[in-house]
Amino acid sequence: MDLLIQLTLNGLFNGAHFALLAMGFALIFGTTGVVHFAYGPVYAVGAYVVWALVALAGLPFWAAVGLGVAATAALGVASYLFIYRPFEIGGSPPFVVLVASLGLFIVIKNMIGIVFGTDVKTVDVAYDVHFVGNAFFTTVQVGQVLAALLVGCGIALFLRTSRYGKAIRAMADNREMATVIGIDTTRLSILVFALGSAVSALAGSLVLLRDGLNPNMGFGAVFVAFVAVIVGGVGSLRGAVIAGFLLAFVQSLGMWQIPTEWQNTIVFVVLFGFLLARPSGIVRRA
């Protein structure tokens, strides 16, 4: 029973992390149509900036998170303006943009290794451990759940009530029509890349406390985010969040009987299952 409780708790907390990653990726992909695989190393850059500010500059953790989020948002905007926007202007096919995204992924990942090194980075920040029987969880994991709730509610409120949010929804539904009625889609794309990247930085900052950092961490992040968006339903933020938690619970509970090294295989099985049984995803886009 203690093992089941621990695996369930792990599913909940990993689900919050997956949901944060999926929200940022879904916001970018669902609005602009760009399969932003460089989202993974951008997420890693945010976490590394926080590490540098805490470990090297001596800043308080949450102050470093704020600066890390800002730096990552700026990197996301730069990715759009200098990589994706020129292809957009030139009318390049999606495959070309996809290749450019993969190239950007490799460049940023390698730059992380060059600048920060390849060893695991950690910070010495104290946090509490709580027990449920013999199962346990930490305040960092609770923070992941709270962050997912606050960010999810904040993004939903922004998209539903603000002028920019409504414009983003219109652009996601039909970019060409949005342009015809006078919506500045370039400005909105910049905003979406900034917001999506900022969300990823928050997720990465909490992973820094929980697991530490390595230059390859971006691959797992974008892999989970991409699968969650497909399973949840492309264009649905709610679906991406639900899928993030679903993947985490399936992955965690699957470890009850399946070795740890098969975790990614479990995620692929879920993806293929949904593609066969429900290609439109958990939440169908209207």
Image (cartoon, rainbow, N blue to C red):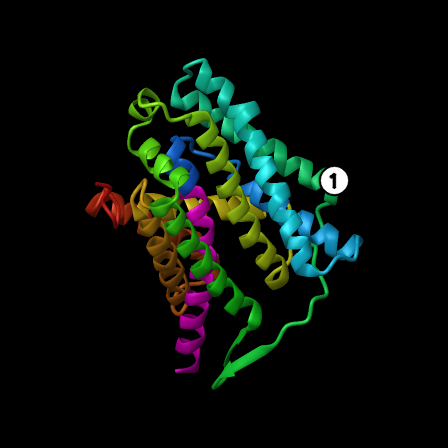
Q: Residue furthest top?
A: 90
Q: Residue at x 37, y 56 (%)?
A: 247
Quadrant hosting residue 64? bottom right
Residue 243's spot in the image, x, y percent? 34, 53
**Pick the front one: 196 or 253:** 196
In the drawing, does residue 31 fall left or right of residue 14?
A: left
Q: Give the magenta-colored segment's residue range.
A: 1-26
Q: Residue at x 64, y 72 (%)?
A: 127
How many neighbours does mark 1 have within 10 angstroms: few (below 14), some (14-19), or many (20 or more)? few
Decide: is 266 above or below 165.
below
In the drawing, does residue 230 fall left or right of residue 107?
A: left
Q: Residue at x 68, y 60 (%)?
A: 61
Residue 230's spot in the image, x, y percent? 33, 43
Q: Secondary structure at mark 1?
A: helix
Q: Amino acid at mark 1?
A: Val
Residue 192's spot in the image, x, y percent? 46, 37
Which residue does the numbered mark 1 point to in the structure image?
A: 115
Q: Residue at x 58, y 77 (%)?
A: 129
